[in-house]
């Protein structure tokens, strides 16, 4: 991957599939800084490198083995929580958590809300 920074044509598009470690995320960021458009596909959010932003994000929220809701994002919008019927949960905000160069949605409030609603059904 490191050789790709010089080999990829300027102004080109590079698709990075399932980056698994920090060096692969760093290479993707270097490609973007060198003027290439970078699309990262199927990246684990727990490896969410701070230099990249989710265009699309989908995370099921479970409660006791059942899907109780989801958190989704469609660029350029915000991360939003939905209940198990697909209704937007307006009272729940999904901020980004930043830690040690990683960025990922903070799902705690959505998880608690969906678990509570699931138990009251």
Image: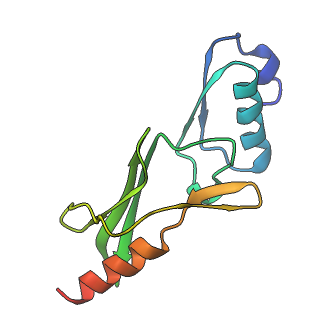
Left or right for 22, reference 103: right
Residue 93 percent across, percent down from the top left: 42, 65
Q: Is residue 68 above or below residue 13?
A: below
- Near-viewer residue (73 or 31): 73
Q: Is residue 15 visible?
A: yes
Q: Is residue 79 above or below residue 39?
A: below
Residue 107 percent across, percent down from the top left: 48, 69
Q: Residue at x 30, y 71 (%)?
A: 67
Left or right for 35, reference 97: right
Q: Quadrant of residue 110?
A: bottom left
Q: Is residue 39 above or below residue 10?
A: below
- Near-viewer residue (36 or 18): 36
Residue 111 percent across, percent down from the top left: 41, 75
Q: Is residue 77 above or below residue 121?
A: above
Residue 6 percent across, percent down from the top left: 81, 17
Q: Quadrant of residue 39?
A: top right
Count the numbered circles shown: 0
Q: Is residue 65 visible?
A: no
Q: Residue at x 36, y 74 (%)?
A: 62
Which color mode does the image show? rainbow
Picture quarter with the C terminus = bottom left
- Extreme-front residue of the structure: 91
Left or right for 108, reference 84: right
Q: Residue at x 25, y 82 (%)?
A: 118
Picture quarter with the N terminus = top right
Q: Residue at x 38, y 54 (%)?
A: 72
């Amino acid at each position: 991957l490191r050789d790709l920074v010089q080999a990829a044509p300027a102004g080109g598009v590079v698709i990075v599939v399932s980056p698994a470690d920090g060096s692969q995320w760093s290479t993707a960021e270097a490609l973007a800084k060198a003027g290439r458009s970078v699309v990262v596909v199927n990246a684990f959010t727990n490896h969410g490198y701070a230099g990249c932003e989710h265009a699309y994000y989908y995370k099921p929220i479970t409660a006791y083995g059942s899907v109780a809701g989801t958190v989704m994002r469609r660029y350029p919008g915000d991360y939003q929580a939905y209940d198990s019927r697909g209704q937007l949960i307006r009272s729940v905000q999904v901020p980004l958590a930043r830690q040690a160069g990683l960025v990922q949605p903070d799902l705690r409030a959505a998880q608690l809300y969906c678990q509570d609603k699931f138990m009251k059904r």
